[in-house]
Amino acid sequence: EGLTALETTRRDLEIARDRVTQTQNQIDDVRAQMTAQNDTIVVLRTDVQKLQSEKIQLLQEQQALTEANHNYQEEAEARKLTINELSGRLSLTTQRVEGLQNELDACRGSANEATQKFRRAQSESDVLSRAVETTKDRSQRLGQSVVLLGRAW
C-alpha cells in the first residue's frame, strides 16, 4: 500500500508536471499572442497617426479648394455683370450704327440728287455757253455786215 501511494503520488506529480508544462505552454502561447497583438497595436497606432495626418492634410486641401471655388464663383459673377454691361453697350452701339447707316443712306441719296442736279445744270450751262458763242458769232457777223453796209452807204 505504501508503494502504491508512492506510485500514485508520483503519477499525480507527473500529471501535475504535465499540467504545469501545459499551463506554461499556454502561458507562452498567450504571451506570444500578446506580443503579436502589441506589435499589431503599434502598427495600427502608426497607421492611425498617418491617417489622421492625411485627414488633416485633406481637410486643409478641401478648405483651400472651397475658398478657390468661392473666389471663382465671385469672379464668374463679376464677369457675368461685365458681359451684361458690354452686351448693353453693344446693343446701344448697334442701334447707333444703324442710325448712322440710315443717315449715310439718306446723305448718299441727297448726294445723288445733287449730282444729278449738277449734271443737268452743267448740261444747261454747256447749252447756254454754246448759245452765247453762237450769239457772239452772229453778233460779230452782224457787226461786220453793219460796217460793210455803212461803208456801202
Image: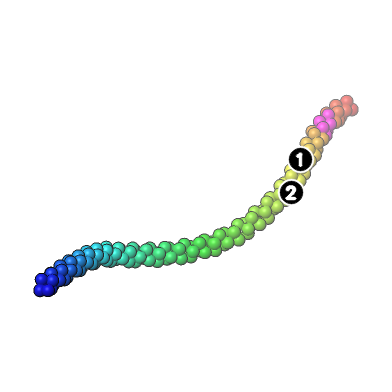
Residue segment shown in magenta: 134-141
Mark 2 and mark 1 in contact? Answer it, CB < 8 Å.
Answer: no
Q: Quadrant of the C terminus?
A: top right
Q: Does the segment drawn in magenta span residue 110? A: no
Q: Position of residue 54 (x, y in %)?
A: 33, 63
Vertical comparison of 24 with 134: above or below:
below
The residue carrying mark 1 is 119
Q: Residue at x 66, y 57 (%)?
A: 95
Disc number at residue 79?
none
Closer to viewer: mark 2 or mark 1? 2
Q: Residue at x 49, y 64 (%)?
A: 73
- Tell which of 35 and 1 is nearer to you: 1
Q: Residue at x 54, y 63 (%)?
A: 81
Residue 17 in sight in this render: no
Q: Is residue 46 left or right of residue 124?
A: left
Q: Residue at x 63, y 59 (%)?
A: 92
Examine the image and state in which quarter residue 122 appears.
top right
Vertical comparison of 125 with 86: above or below:
above
The residue carrying mark 2 is 110
Q: Does the segment drawn in magenta span residue 140? A: yes
- Residue type, label 2: Ser
Q: Main secondary structure of the magenta part?
A: helix
- Tell which of 53 and 136 is nearer to you: 53
Q: What is the spatial separation of the Cα atoms under label 2 and label 1, in whole angstroms? A: 14 Å
Q: Position of residue 143 (x, y in %)?
A: 83, 31
Q: Is residue 90 left or right of residue 31?
A: right
Vertical comparison of 76 with 152: above or below:
below
Residue 11 in sight in this render: yes
The crowd level at tag 1 (other Cα within 10 Å; few <14, some 14-19, many 20+) is: few
Q: Secondary structure at mark 1?
A: helix
